[in-house]
Amino acid sequence: TTAPLSVPVEGMTCASCVSRVERVLKRLPGVDDATVNLATETATVQSLGVPLADLMKAVRDAGYEVPRRQ
Ligand code: 9UX
């Protein structure tokens, strides 16, 4: 496991959203763990070299938005 990646996630409004995003991220090959903080709208992902773009695609495919941060 390398350093955790932070992925901004928008569009979550309840705890079930959080669970859903965590689940789709954890399902990706190479992802060891994923936690989502609803208040900060951030997913923190522990993985072995999974490209950020793949994480973003999984979140978007699940129906949430990954904004360009800043
Ligand atoms: Mo909660 Mo989230 O009722 O997509 S699951 S709003």
Image (cartoon, helix red, strand yellow):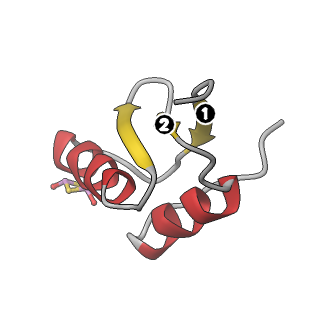
The reply to whether dot 1 and dot 2 touch (C-beta < 8 Å) is yes
Q: Is residue 16 left or right of residue 39?
A: left
Spot occupied by residue 15 in the image (x, y as percentages of width and height)? 19, 39
Q: Is residue 23 left or right of residue 58?
A: left
State the residue position of label 2: 45
Mark 2 C-beta to ligand 1 under 8 Å? no
Residue visible at 62% across and 24% down in the picture: 3
Spot occupied by residue 14 in the image (x, y as percentages of width and height)? 23, 43
In which image quadrant can residue 48 be found?
top right
Q: Tag on residue 6?
A: 1
Picture layout, residue 35 above or below residue 3:
below
The mark that comes first in sequence, 1 or 2, is: 1
Residue visible at 57% across and 69% down in the picture: 57
Spot occupied by residue 68 in the image (x, y as percentages of width and height)? 78, 51
Residue visible at 32% across and 50% down in the picture: 26
SS under mark 1: strand
Looking at the rendered structure, the kind of residue marked 2 is Val
Residue visible at 34% across and 52% down in the picture: 21
Graded by Cα atoms within 10 Å as few (under 14), some (14 to 19) or many (20 or more), the crowding at tag 2 reads: many
Q: Nearer the viewer, residue 36 or 45?
A: 45
Indicate which label's residue lies in the foreground, 1 or 2.
2
Q: Is residue 58 left or right of residue 22?
A: right
Ligand 1 falls in which quarter?
bottom left
Picture layout, residue 42 above or below residue 31:
above
Looking at the rendered structure, the kind of residue marked 1 is Ser
In which image quadrant can residue 56 be found?
bottom right
SS under mark 2: strand
- In which quadrant is the C terminus drawn? top right
